[in-house]
Amino acid sequence: MIEFGYSIQSNRQIDFDRNTRQVYKYIRRKEPSIDWCMSCGTCASGCTAGYASDFSLRRMILLARRGEEKEIRDGIFRCRLCGKCLNACPRGVNTRNIIYWMQQAVKNTQTL
Amino acid sequence: MKSIAVIGGGVAGMEAAAKLSKMGFSVTLIEKTNQLGGKLNKWHALFPSRRPADEVLNGLKTRVQLGINILLNTEVEHIENDDDGFAIALNQNRMITAHAILLATGFDIFDAGKKEEYGHGIYDNVITSVELEKAFRSGAVKTLQGKTPKKIAFIHCVGSRDEKAGNPHCSKVCCVTGVKQAIELKEMIPDSEIYMFYLDLRMFGRHFEELYKEAQVKHHIQFIRGRLSEAFENQDHTVMIKIEDTLIARPLKMNVDLLVLLVGMQPSGSINKIIHDLELEKEKDGFLKQADKHLAPHKTNIPGVFVIGAASGPKTIEETVNEAGAVTFEIADYLQNKIATKILKNENSFI
Ligand SMILES: Cc1cc2nc3c(=O)[nH]c(=O)nc-3n(C[C@H](O)[C@H](O)[C@H](O)COP(=O)(O)OP(=O)(O)OC[C@H]3O[C@@H](n4cnc5c(N)ncnc54)[C@H](O)[C@@H]3O)c2cc1C
Ligand code: SF4
Ligand code: SF4
Ligand code: SF4
């Protein structure tokens, strides 16, 4: 058989009808200040982990909001838990708690 | 007695007419429709306090009762401007004169049908923010099939910030209107999910930012940055939308029961004749030009012709009412100076 090199690409589309957003809802119960996030990126601009990788807490929170949980699992453990973001956030989001609970959610949810 | 013709009987015209009349001028208020109040008649509750619009409307109505010559169903057919003032021809062969003219002709609501790709007027469950206000006034929001919508998306900037739609400007009030409406919907249908698709959230006014935070925190309304390219109707009459989630940089797709288009404000189409007769200038965005944005915002390029409210760009009711107060001084000042120069002229001719 001739190999044409076709393959099925994984879909990059966020499917809002399918995503359940269970991680977000779990974190919200544990740390309601996640709702205060306005995606400004102040946390990510001075982030220790973001300096050397593409890690961004802003993006992690958004991915949780969209229910894109696979990407969270791949990313959330890059955080160094230094806490700089906690000082930076203008809305007073408890970022470290959010990271902690996000990591717990990823560890505890097998369906992810 | 000096006379002033106020053209347009919305918030701007009503408030200015009341103030000018109180100052002792003879005021004629010209309104083309059969009622005063302008767009205020269409709104249910006002941002950010959600005060009933009728309360403000009634407040304005009680002020315009005394001494003002109110002409409803009246349109200006022709205006002549000479040294002494203005001769204004109205429909039904009526004629009035005025020493000064105040334009309070407001704005037009963007016709959502022009953005055909969003399906307004084609799909069953695509409505505008103006239609949503009407539904709030009636007390129920339903899909065309009579169901209670559970998933609702709002699209910001429909017919605004859109050069192809002819409106390069930001309409200013639709962001906060959308947030207010989302909260109202969520309170009406507590188990609904609501999504706002925005380009920028322009929460410029006092208490607007707080309303935005309330929407996020108290009502769990989701804000997603991105602009809709087109909507599709599914067989079950839900609407599919595809948008780039620009903060994540990935495409996003969802089906909603109801799609609400936050339509913008555009220049009034019904004053072109007046603009022509008076030789008024417009700006690039099509709204009337203010003589000096900072130092003479209520004057036009023609002496004796003034402008307030949404006729000179998108404004809130608060701003409009403020302008109505400020313009009364400008008009009084203009008329006084005019008398003074006349006396001076006459004196000179006697010498
Ligand atoms: C969806 C939406 C919701 C809004 N909600 C709010 C809110 O909650 N709070 C707030 O502060 N603002 C709100 N606004 C803005 C508000 O509507 C305006 O600030 C206000 O209407 C401006 O008043 P106006 O008198 O300048 O214009 P208009 O309300 O447009 O009134 C103009 C009047 O002039 C008449 N007219 C026009 N041309 C002529 C003519 N040639 N001859 C005679 N008469 C004429 C019209 O019939 C009309 O009665 C909203 C706007 C939109 C689009
Ligand atoms: S705690 Fe984590 S997310 Fe916050 S600044 Fe440090 S490394 Fe970045
Ligand atoms: S700094 Fe705070 S509000 Fe801004 S993105 Fe980070 S968590 Fe969200
Ligand atoms: S106020 Fe908001 S929705 Fe309206 S045009 Fe401006 S940015 Fe767009």
Image (spheres, coloured by chain):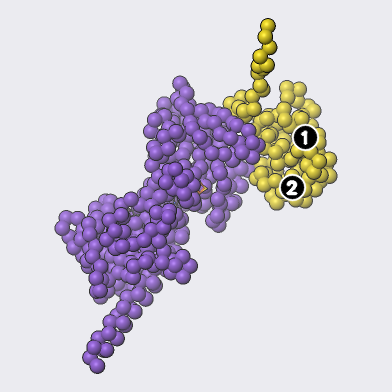
Chain of the residue where label 2 is placed in the rendered structure: A
Which residue is at the front of the view, B334 or A1?
A1
Give amino acid for label 2: Ser
Image quarter in which the N terminus of chain B is found: bottom left
Quarter where residue B139 is shown: top left
- Residue at left 37%, top 63%? B307
Could you tell me if residue A29 is visible in this image?
no
- Mark 2 neighbour density, 10 Å: few (under 14) some (14–19) many (20 or more): some
Quarter where residue A15 is shown: top right
Lower sequence index among marks 2 and 1: 2
Res. B318 mark: none
Do marks 2 and 1 both belong to one polypeptide chain?
yes
Res. A76 mark: 1
Could you tell me if residue B297 is visible in this image?
yes
Chain given the colour yellow: A
Toward the front, the furthest residue is A2
In the image, residue B52 above or below residue A101: below
Give how far across and how far down residue A38 sits, in percent: 65, 45
Give how far across and how far down residue B10 sits, in percent: 35, 56
Give how far across and how far down residue B109 sits, in percent: 39, 46
- Residue at left 80%, top 48%? A84
In the image, residue B101 above or below residue A62: below
Q: CA distance from mark 2 to mark 1?
A: 16 Å
Give how far across and how far down residue B177 sits, in percent: 49, 47
Chain given the colour purple: B
Tag 2 secondary structure:
helix
Q: Which residue is mark 2?
A: A45
